[in-house]
Amino acid sequence: MSDTNRITGAFQVISPIATNTNTVNTDILEAMAKVSQAGQVLFLEIKKNYNFINNVCWIEPVEDAISDKKSTAYKLLSRRSQECIKAKLLIRLKAEDRRHLGLKDNPNRVYFMLNPHFIRCKELSLAVAIWSEYLR
């Protein structure tokens, strides 16, 4: 197999692409199409810190984006992440779930989980259980 045909990187296993438009199942391509370009850029930035074991990702935004809720940076991060959340690409993890996953408390990070139905991980059953809690 030539180097140009090899698939490399953390995103090797994704859910099947939905080809039947009569079903309610969406795939990652349809979800990405629902998000603005700015939201897609945020998604790509978040996935740079991707853990393939449990689908957890994080971003370390500029300081104002976390601490000052009236800042432009905070509003932009919030708006773009909400786009990705509404498209069901990811969820923002609550403190309880971060502790359950053994993540250290870092005030400079915002933790997310990628949709395990779109991007498979090693601990799929745990990721699906956490994901399902947020859909209630």
Image (spheres, grey):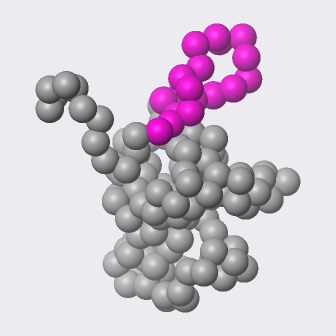
Q: Does the stretch in magenta take in 18?
A: yes
Specify the principal SS of the magenta part: loop
Which quadrant is the C terminus positioned in?
A: bottom right
Question: On screen, 117 above or below 127?
Answer: above
Q: Residue furthest right?
A: 136
Q: Residue at x 61, y 47 (%)?
A: 116
- Residue 7 image-quadrant placement: top left
Choose top left, top right, bottom left or bottom right for residue 54: bottom right
Viewed as shown, does residue 2 lie left or right of 103?
A: left
Residue at 53%, 44% in the rendered image: 119
Q: Which residues are magenta?
A: 13-30
Percent coordinates x, y for residue 26 in the rendering:
63, 28
In reply to whether residue 67 is colored magenta, the answer given is no
Q: Which quarter of the figure has residue 47?
A: bottom left
At x 24%, y 32%, the residue is 6
Residue 51, percent across and down? 46, 63
Q: Describe residue 77's horizontal placement relative to residue 16 as left or right.
A: left
Q: Is residue 83 visible?
A: no
Q: Is residue 17 something that shows in the picture?
A: yes
**76 or 45, which is in the foreground?**
45
Give the residue drawn at x 19%, y 25%: 1
Relative horizontal placement of residue 122, taking residue 40 as reference (left or right): right
Q: Position of residue 42 (x, y in %)?
A: 39, 55
Frontmost residue, 128 versus 80: 128
